[in-house]
Amino acid sequence: AIVACPSLIIHTLEGSLKPKVQWLKELGMDDSQVAKTITKFPNILGSYCLEENLKPKVQWLKELGMDDSQVAKTITKFPQLMGISLEENLKPRVQWLKELGMDDSQVAKTITMFPNLIGSVSLEENLQPKVQWLKELGMDDSQ
């Protein structure tokens, strides 16, 4: 983690690093999931404020209907999600999924299984053209 994110060593142990690890564990992550999350995205410990960035995203995921285990699984699979803008990226993509006909439980399940779908795949350049292509094949939104 230090090689990928050397700025971690400038953060305080008690004031920044330990509270974030404890918070990840409170979400239901075990030690191996915490280690995997930090290895994939060390900035989760350093660059993002727990109160202003990380907790609001988790609260939003829960408001979508995700339970603690789904949230923990999602963050472990794609921790970069925690660094993506809620207002500019995540909410519009979830709204798009709902416009396709997904209900809240389907959205929660989709995010848990494929968190990069709302986090890293371009809506305009990737997702929308694929859906349009599938529609042209005769599939409708419910399929």
Image (spheres, rainbow, N blue to C red):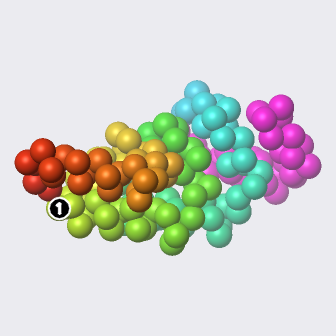
Task: Out of 116 and 60, give the one closest to the viewer.
Answer: 116
| Camera-nearest residue between 111 and 128 | 128
The magenta stretch spans residue 89:
no
Please give the name of the residue rendered at 68% of the width and 49% of the height, measured from the top-left corner: 44
> Is 89 in front, or is 126?
126
Q: How many marks?
A: 1
Amino acid type at image mark 1: Gly
The percent coordinates of residue 21 (x first, y second) are 67, 45
Query: Which residue corresponds to the image point at 25% horizontal and 51% vertical from the top-left?
Result: 131
Residue 31 in sight: no
In the rendered image, which quarter contains the N terminus? Answer: top right
Where residue 141 appears, x then y in whole percent?
14, 56
Q: Is residue 50 left or right of residue 72?
A: right
Q: Position of residue 5 (x, y in %)?
A: 80, 40
Image vertical order of residue 8 relative to residue 65, above or below: above
Kindly identify the residue that appears in the image at 41 percent across and 57 percent down. 123
The majority secondary structure of the magenta stretch comes to: helix
Task: Give the percent coordinates (x, y) of residue 102.
Answer: 20, 58
One can see residue 111 in this view: yes
Q: Which residue is mark 1?
A: 101
Of residues 123 and 15, the one nearer the viewer is 123
Question: Residue at position x 28%, y 55% from top?
Answer: 107
Q: Is residue 20 magenta?
A: yes
Give the quarter of the image for residue 79: top right
Q: Position of 135 compared to 5: left or right?
A: left
Above or below, comparing residue 98 to residue 7 in the picture: below
Q: Which residues are magenta?
A: 1-29
